[in-house]
Image: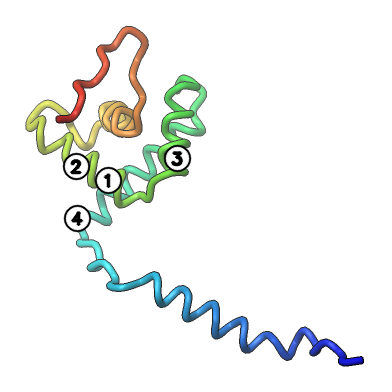
Amino acid sequence: MARAPAPWIMLPALALLATSTVAMGQAKAPPPPSKDMLDAASANLRIIAAALQAKEVDTPIKNALFGCLYRNNLAKITESTNKVLANNPGKIDRKNPTQMLMVIAGVCGYRPAGAAAPAPKR
């Protein structure tokens, strides 16, 4: 009767398989983010983290933020937030955490009770 190989013998093969699978999924690495994008992303993350811990922030907003962060990477959230800011020049102060929280929450799908639904995309 043949014996099964010791588990440690298979480790190099598993490591090779894992690295080749990861490498296959990465056709081309995205360009590194700019300093402005990193600054905006870190500011957004600080706002999200503070909102999730704040007693003053309502649960539906926290749920939207957490779900958004769970389903999307920070770069995508920041890109969407930057688009809202660009489309509303002078209306939103990036340095005002309350305004930025509302923008981020909106990007993450939060709609206050009684707010109109967004227009369907064409």
Q: Which residue is mark 2?
A: 82
Q: Residue at x 51, y 23 (%)?
A: 55
Amino acid type indicated by mark 1: Thr
Q: Amino acid at mark 2?
A: Asn
Q: Are marks 2 and 1 in contact (CB under 8 Å)?
A: yes
Q: Report if residue 56 is visible in the image.
A: no
Q: Nearer the viewer, mark 2 or mark 3?
A: 2
What is the quadrant of the N terminus in the image? bottom right
Please name the residue shown 55% across and 85% down the image: 16
Q: Where residue 81 appears, x then y in whole percent?
A: 24, 39
Q: Nearer the viewer, mark 4 or mark 2?
A: 2
Q: Earlier in the sequence, mark 4 or mark 3?
A: 4
Using the image as rendered, state which of residue 83 and residue 71 is in the foreground: 71
SS class, disc 1: helix
Furthest-right residue in view? Answer: 1
- Could you tell me how far apart the alpha carbons at marks 4 and 2 are, in whole angstroms? 11 Å
The type of residue carrying mark 3 is: Ala
Sequence-first tag of 4 and 1: 4
Q: Earlier in the sequence, mark 4 or mark 2?
A: 4
Of the numbered discs in the image, which one, if any, rests on residue 36? 4
Residue 104 placement: quadrant: top left
Q: Residue under label 1, please give it.
A: 78
